[in-house]
Each structure stands twice: as C-alpha cells, then as structure tokens.
Image (cartoon, rainbow, N blue to C red):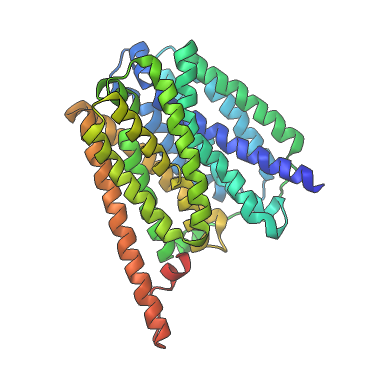
Amino acid sequence: MAARSLWLAVGAASLATFSVVTTEMLPVGLLTPIADTMRVSTGSAGLTISLPALLAALFAPLVVIASGGMDRRKILSGLLGLLVIANVGSAFAPGLGWLLAARVLVGFCMGGIWAIAGGLAARLVPHGAVGLATSIIFGGVAAASVMGVPLGSLIGELAGWRWAFASMAVFSALVLALHLAVMPALPVASSASARQFGAQLANRGLRTGLLLTLLLVTGHFTAFTFVRPLLLSVSGFDAQWIGALLFAYGLAGIAGNFLAGIAAAQRTVPTLTAIALGLLLTPALFLAVGGFPIGGSVALVAWGLAYGGVSVGLMTWMMKAAPGHVEVATALYVAVFNIGISLGSWAGGQIVDGFGLTGNLFAAGGLAAAALLVLTLYASLGKQGAKAGSDGKPAKCSAQVRAK
C-alpha cells in the first residue's frame, strides 16, 4: 500500500482506541443523571465503570492468545461493530441491569481493541516510523482518557445522558466504516502464547511497570469516578458548569500527554516520578482550596495536567521493559490498567457511600504516594545495579536499568 494509505490506517487504529476508551469513560461525567434516572445510589451507578473495566482486564490477554492467525483487520472490524451495538444498548437501557449488560459488551470490546491495536504500528509503517505510529495509536487512548468525560458531560447537559451513548454509537459506526475503507489485511502466522505471558511476568522491569500502573490508575479513578458530585457538592458549582470544567480538565490532560510523551522517551523514570508527585499533590490541593469554585477549578486543571501523562508514560515504560514482546506487554498493561479502573471506581463507590466524597481524595493521595515510593526504590536499585556493573561485578538489576 502507498505510504499515505498506511498512515491513514494508523489514524484509523487511533480512532478505534479513542472510540472504545471514550465509551468506557462516558459514565464518569454522567453518574448523577444516570443514578437519578435508574433510581439507584451514586455508588451503584459507579458499576457502569468498574464492570466493563474488570472484564476488559480479563479479555485483553485472552483475545491476544485466542486470536491465533486470524486477520487482525477482521478482529478490529468485528469488535467495532460490537461497540456500536453496546452503545445503542446503553442509550435505550430501561434499567440498571440492562445498562450493565450493555457495559459487559463494552468490556469485551475494550480489552480486544486496545490489545490488538497496540501491536499494529510495526506492521503498518517502516521501522524508522514505528515510534511515531505507536504514539499516534496510543494517542487515541490518551485523548479519550482526558476528553471522553468532558465530551460525555457536555452532550449529557445539552440533550441528556442517553444521547451521549447514542452519539458514540454513531461515531463508532463511522470509525468502523473508515476501518473497512483504509485498513489493509493484517494476517499473522501465530499469536502470543500463555507461556510467553508467563515468561514476561518474570521480567522485573515489566512487573514494576504493572505495579505502577495499578497504583496510579486505581488512585486516580478512586476519586475521579465521582468528580461530578465532587464539583457539585464540595466545590459548590452549578450543574451547567460541569461540562466546561471537565473540558478544561481535558485540555490540560492533552497538554500533559504531549509533555510526558516527549519527556518519557528519554527519561522515563523521572517523568513518571513527576506524574506521581502531581497526583499526590492534586488531592491535597483539592482538600485545601477545593471547597470554593475558584480553588476547585484550579485543582481540577492541575489534576488533568498530572493524569494526562499517565497512559503514554506507562506505555513507554512497558515498551522499554519488553522491546521484543510488545503485544504481550501491551495486553498485560491493558489488563492491569483496567483492573485499576475497576478497582478504583468500585472502591471509590464504597468510600463515597461510607465516608463521603472527600474520603476518596485521601485514598487517591495515598496510592499516589505509594507509587512515588516504588519509583524511588526502583531508581535506587537501578543505580546500585549500574554501579555493580561498572565495578565489574554482576549487575542484578539489569531489567530496571534497561527500562530506565
């Protein structure tokens, strides 16, 4: 295929990841109206986030293992078709049970699309352009992570939460049409095996990256799943301001994504250390000044700036830790990332129902502090390993040094 057509295929893969992650994130900005419509508690409505995330964690490695030699174009097209159905089902769900059933389908699509799309860059563009293509594909994840919530909230404010899901159904259908038009055939001789997954779990650098993913993502979603009621009840904003506030959060997040992406390519550990520090300080800022509209808006923008770099920073870590097994590393990363979303949104719901909204901020700060401690220990062990190697002795921390 012509080079231009291949880059169109890269763009289509990026839009696929954007579609599925945005669909996953939509309820975050719509929890209050969903809970009111379904006549359930805000914590119960949080299941619309935790359930698909948990299933995505299960399906990501299974899809990679089970796909075998199946054409990846067919897999992605089929998953996008299911995503359209899931969004239509969410839009017309008469009760929470039906909505959760549709969200189960979202979880299946999430795990499959993200895991398969993550390994496509090397198959679509020349070797020298793989880094850029990977950044574009995962840029869809980053953009959706920071823009999915404000987009859903804006549509929900203008037309109701059901129209947010209906809009994503239309958008996903357009992305499917684009895939069918520009994505080339992508047959493979074999797929990753369970043994390869087990071997990579012995990779110390990869394990550390997965632990950081769990801590940072869980901490973020413990509090952010309930950002709408937090802004309404704690900061005192009127409902009509929520969409604009979350849009400002999204813009800050995109800026954070580009800043972290540029920095992480050269200095991955310091970049993630700065992100963890930002996610530690943001809840403290919210607790200190978030009780007023101006303070709450400043804290929210700082939150977006800090979290915007999480997905690209962690993915850069994974690719450096397992450069020869990117598809396996991507599937494990997707699994743990979604476990973090599920665990965070579930735990956040329990904390909200039992201790109130500010309790989530303390929990989020504590998990960010744990991630900062892991990074500090990791950097220390990496320096010790490098010193041992320079002294002519065996360097026991080669995985850490390589990932750094």
Tell me what residue is drawn at x 55 percent, y 46 percent. Answer: 115
- Depth check: give the residue in front, 246 or 314: 246
- Depth check: give the residue in front, 176 or 247: 247
Residue 114 horizontal/vertical position (percent): 54, 42
Q: Is residue 306 above or below residue 170?
A: below
Q: Is residue 370 left or right of residue 90?
A: left
Residue 88 horizontal/vertical position (percent): 55, 19
Q: Is residue 376 above or below residue 234?
A: below
Q: Is residue 100 visible?
A: no
The furthest residue to the bottom:
392
- Depth check: give the residue in front, 194 or 361: 361
Residue 358 horizontal/vertical position (percent): 22, 32
Tell me what residue is drawn at x 55 percent, y 17 percent. Answer: 166
- Depth check: give the residue in front, 158 or 367: 158
Tell me what residue is drawn at x 57 percent, y 64 percent. Answer: 324
Tell me what residue is drawn at x 67 percent, y 40 percent. Answer: 11
